[in-house]
Image (spheres, rainbow, N blue to C red):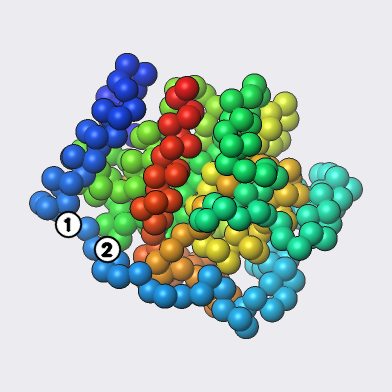
Amino acid sequence: MTKNKLNIWNPQTPWEISEKAWDEKSSILNKSHPLKILTSLPKMPGITEETAKGLQYKSIKYLLFEDPKHIFLHYFFKKPFKYAYHFIKSALKKRSYKRDKDFFLYGIDSVETFQTELKKENRLLVVGFSYCHKPYECPSGRFSAECQRDLDNPVCAQCFIGKATHALPLFKGNIQPLFIPTIHYIGEELFKLKEKHPDKTLLFLITACEMTLEMFGNWGNMIQAKGIGVRLDGRICNTMKAFELSEKGIKPGLTVVLPETQQRILQLIKTLWE
Ligand code: SF4
């Protein structure tokens, strides 16, 4: 929960002024409290050739057998026929998503369709951020489901997750930000939200590595969540070994949302205020 009472984004202030105020403060703090950042973007394939072989099988194996709490089986067997039908339907397609640059679209045809969905009644939007693009200096800890997004903290004030989260109109009550340490965590949260709000359509905007977006797309389609997976760049996980270590919090590299993609996310968030 944010510590600050006054948000830079609020219904009385035009979006552009709020964003300018955030960026100016961030730029000043960048000089006095520079963060450790990637000095250059590594050229890495999204998924290595070896890892890409049998990836769906690897994802099923990982979800089911690396899950001490049996989260997926617990929820799957609540509606086995429905979930099996939607999983198979998605798995039979060549791809579980449609790609638009760094946006991977699930259950929607375009960003415009997503914007239309956002404006409909009875929608619940999950905005999720993978922990691997939290700054090294994150006061809530990188491998954590917490984000204090403290405006007085010089790290939070320079963090894209902090900016995007502050820019969300959370007062509307139909947006749930999440900070994602593991795939089982986000899976359980989505299942729980579906159960808690059976009358609402679940939408999502979630950052993740390309490999994760490829591996778990069918599972998102299985619960009929519609939305956008945002591809991360930087020191991504592109092998199963790196993915499995990252799921245990061993992630020395930093990932990033590319600047153009950050702007696309912010433009989507801006439409939530309309
Ligand atoms: S805003 Fe960024 S730095 Fe601050 S707690 Fe959240 S993730 Fe960490």
Q: Position of residue 231 (x, y in %)?
A: 51, 58
Q: Residues within 10 Å of mark 2 (few under 14, many from 20)?
A: few
In the picture, which quadrant includes the N terminus?
A: top left
The quadrant holding residue 112 is top right
The residue lying toward the viewer, choosing from 67 and 87, is 87
Which three-letter amino acid code belongs to the residue tagged 1?
A: Pro
Q: Residue at x 67, y 43 (%)?
A: 108
Q: Is residue 8 left or right of residue 86?
A: left
Which three-letter amino acid code belongs to the residue tagged 2?
A: Ile
Q: Residue at x 72, y 60 (%)?
A: 95
Q: Residue at x 43, y 63 (%)?
A: 233
Q: Is residue 224 above or below residue 201?
A: below
Q: Which element is circle 1 on?
A: loop
Q: Residues within 10 Å of mark 1 (few under 14, many from 20)?
A: some
The residue lying toward the viewer, choosing from 149 and 120, is 120
Q: Which element is circle 2 on?
A: loop
Q: Position of residue 242 (x, y in %)?
A: 51, 74
Q: Is residue 14 above or below residue 222?
A: above
The quadrant holding residue 217 is bottom right
Q: Position of residue 69 (x, y in %)?
A: 66, 57
Q: Which mark is residue 37?
A: 2
Separation of residues labelled 1 and 2 (CA atoms): 9 Å
Outermost residue, bottom direction? 50
Total numbered labels: 2
Q: Which mark is residue 208?
A: none
Residue 144 visible, this orientation: no
Q: Is mark 1 within 8 Å of ligand 1?
A: no
Q: Residue at x 69, y 72 (%)?
A: 55
Residue 130 visible, this orientation: yes
Q: Position of residue 36 (x, y in %)?
A: 24, 63
Residue at mark 1 = 34
